Image (cartoon, helix red, strand yellow):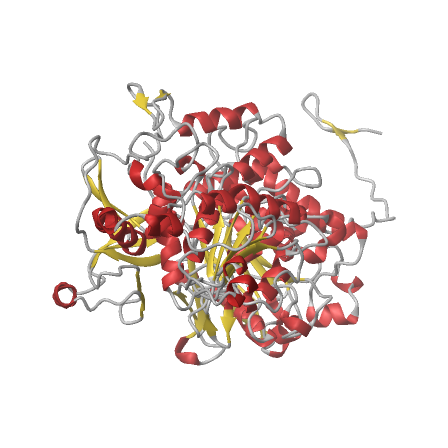
Amino acid sequence: MYEQTLYKILNNIVPEKVLKSNNKKRLWNYGYNKEYDIIVISKSGMIGDIYEIQNLKIALPKEEDVYKFKKNYWDKLDYPKELSKIKNVFDWDKHPDNFKEKWYDYIDKEFERREKGFWFNNKGVSTFITGSHYMYLCWTKIDVGQPNFRESNRLFYIFWEACKADIRSYGMCYLKNRRSGFSFMSSSELVHEATTSRDSRFGILSKTGSDAKKMFTDKVVPISLNYPFFFKPIQDGMDRPKTELAYRVPASKLTRKKLDANEAATELEGLDTTIDWKNTGDNSYDGEKLKILAHDESGKWERPDNILNNWRVTKTCLRLGSKIIGKCMMGSTSNSIEKGGGNFKKLYSDSNVNKRNKNGQTKSGLYSLFIPMEWNYEGFIDVYGYPVFDDPGKEIEGPLGDVIDQGVINHWNNEVEGLKSDPDGLNEYYRQFPRTESHAFRDESKQSLFNLQKLYQQIDYNDSLIKDRFVTRGSFSWKNGIKDTEVIFSPNDRGRFYVTWTPKKQLQNQYYLKNGVKYPKNDHIGAFGCDSYDISGTVGGGGSNGALHGVTKFHMDEGPTNEFFLEYIARPQTAEMFFEDVLMACVFYGMPILIENNKPRLLYHFKNRGYRGFSMNRPDKVYNKLSQTEKELGGMPNSSEDIKQAHAAAIESYIEKNVGFDLSGTFREKDLIGSMYFIRTLEDWARFDINKRTKFDASISSGLAIMAIQKNLYQPIKNKSKIKLNFARYDNKGSYSQIIK
């Protein structure tokens, strides 16, 4: 059975006494509450359940005034026919006061729901939707008519409301599946906010200028046009504009003729607010001030356009000094890595709410949200708005009266099974309908050097795991802060190390001294590989990461064999911090390390601290054939073609034996998955290009680690001795041995 994991309700975040007291006095303010680290989206002064959606803690309003539909699920709220005939405020003004009095309560209620949100009974459960979601469901016309209620959209809008409420946030970066309704939802939000905002500007960007224009003309304008008169501001220009929708006093109402005739001009109040779109480019909306930017198909910006460059520029349109004055609603499926997907993946990763700077902001300023496809797949949503995950025992009714007799998980698996012989088709399907973040950024297979089938089998398996049970994040440090004593490992959510195994106490910090130099004692268990760097910072703050990997080999001690147990891919503030991280890991595990020697500062760090014995010599040469520098420092060059090929072959061999399923049963049972749990490294292997090795820090490091535990494979062939030794040969038949002449 599929387990619901999109959100969880948090208890005991706010002490019960405080909660009751503040609710009674209506003291909860809309926005970020620093004391309890929650984002309050309630506008009533009271809060109820606290949701955690993708690590964001969101306090919903307290339940009140729950609406009950006849069918116990969301149904269309009828618009009174008498009001539907009124097209604008001028028509309304023509009606007598007694007519208006009849509808004031109805109109006020709609404004209240728009502002505060709406509670309704859904399958016997009191369910809250935000004001934006209410406007989408009730007053937004989409391509199929009226939108249906979906639980996934409810959570999307709650998350979005939290982004709007949080003064630290620039908005959302939504990783979606195809046909999720994002374009309509973002268009609805533009109109909803624009029709209640003064002196503001709203913008649209998409993967191309024509796509942005289409979103404006086919979605935004019709939504605005179909608003009820009491939500519709005075509009300037054409009913169906092509470039700009302007909510301001029409110029035609203040004509020279009227002024000359001394006629009293009708006092009209406009918002002076606009919605427009821009062509796609790095500098779109540069210098503008925006309240909301709808950023559609952000994962499909292809060269020369770059979503990262655009966001750096656009971000400034949403702030005034340090104050955030606007929000971005960004959403997209992802193209392949080389077709814009790589940049979007970085932007999405930089939007992780768990990774904040000292100002409380993520690296991008956005908040990332991913909703798996099974939550939002057309044809598998029941009348209550919930997905039908598993094959039902009996037919289930859909929102349009359609019948659902299959679960979405089974449907998806069948599609995947049918595409297994078409790797690129399969990857495209994964990107369009992802069940995991890894699926969403699945790359094309054409350029892959290694077995992608095995790599993706392992990635998919890892995605299904509760990662905390297999991988621990943490830091190494010297005991009591005294260097060159004992290294300890401490779990830490901000640590740079990811480990799956730590040896027992008796195997930790094991080394011996030889001629005053320290050597590792656990070289029979495993080894490390490292791709280092020498310079702390680069122009613009870029530069590759330092990478370190630890892998075990077959051994008789307790612990895993032929398994990667440590991953480190990071670039600390200084190179010295990186060097010390690497040294501490080696000392803690008591294992040697094979380091690329083209950047020698790490090698000097080991030597100068007395750990030259930990630095392995290149295995493809005997000691007396090493250069003087190689004898002094150790390390492995990366320049020769033979070494490049050997390095790639080492990774290839490891993948075949230890990653994914071994369908032939050569190395392990057919149904036994590999135990390589580091997804970043697996993804790096999937993209590895032997001609552009410098881009793949994890591959370089992990390959060196494999070569380190297999050093005997690379030992040079010794020349045969020219001295011939003739041994006597014996015939051992019969009772006596006789020399064969």
Please tell me in which quadrant of the rendered image residue 380 appears: top left
Picture layout, residue 607 above or below residue 291? below
The residue shown at (46%, 53%) is 190
Residue 563 against residue 584 in the figure, above or below: above
Q: Position of residue 456 (x, y in %)?
A: 55, 38
Residue 479 place in picture, x, y as percent: 41, 75
Does 18 sit left or right of 455 as displayed?
A: left
Residue in front for this viewpoint, 229 or 64: 229
Residue 66 appears at what percent x and percent y? 18, 45
Nearest to the observer: residue 247 or residue 658: 247
Q: Is residue 695 visible?
A: yes
Residue 51, horizontal then vertical, whole percent: 29, 53
Which image quadrant: the N terminus?
A: top left
Residue visible at 18% across and 51% down in the picture? 63
- Quarter placement of the C terminus: top right
Residue 683 in the figure: left or right of residue 38 = right
- Farthest residue to the right: give it: 722
Instruction: Give whichever of 394, 550 is nearer the camera.
Output: 394
